[in-house]
Amino acid sequence: MDESVVFVMRFNPGSDATPVFQKYLIPYDPQKTVLDTLQYIYEHVDRSLAFRGACQSGVCGVCGVKLNGKPCLACATYMARKMKIEPLSGHKVIRDLVVDYNGEKR
């Protein structure tokens, strides 16, 4: 099976001192998006992963993350063989990839 290596930043400000990256190996499919990747991890590997997705058409911006250091919409960006996924910079992290869009920018 062709696999993708995915590193996802995990952080719960209420219980973790610092963020850590967790490694996942998942099936690689170049027709799947980063949001599909996160949903696969949640449904098949780790039900504790926190992320957001809504419109799945690149309109609302709720699924914004950093992929390999660059901001993107997870629903409009295709997966890669190696991915490092982090929350968007400049926002308070609520948990894992979920950020506070309404609060003060950091």
Image: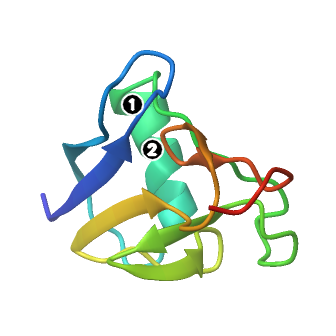
Secondary structure at numbered mark 2: helix
Left or right of residue 33, residue 10 in this image: left
- Find residue 40 and name its label: 2
Viewer-proximal residue among 79 and 90: 90
Tell me the colour scheme of the image. Answer: rainbow
Left or right of residue 92, residue 80 in this image: left
Q: Give the image quarter of residue 76.
A: bottom right
Residue at 65 percent of width and 49 percent of height: 99
Residue 73 showing in the rendered view: yes
Q: Position of residue 37 (x, y in %)?
A: 44, 56
Tally of marks: 2
Q: Position of residue 62 (x, y in %)?
A: 77, 60
Viewer-proximal residue among 62 and 30: 62
- Residue 59 against residue 93 in the figure, above or below: below
| Mark 2: few/some/many CA within 10 Å (<14, 14-19, 20+) | some
Residue at 29 percent of width and 65 percent of height: 84
- Residue at the spot of label 1: 44
- Find residue 55 and name its label: none
Q: Position of residue 41 (x, y in %)?
A: 40, 40
Residue type pointed to by label 1:
His
Residue at 76 percent of width and 65 percent of height: 56
Secondary structure at numbered mark 1: helix
Residue type pointed to by label 2:
Tyr
Callout 1 touching callout 2 (CB < 8 Å): yes
Q: Position of residue 9 (x, y in %)?
A: 34, 48
Q: Which quadrant of the rendered structure holds the C terminus?
A: bottom right
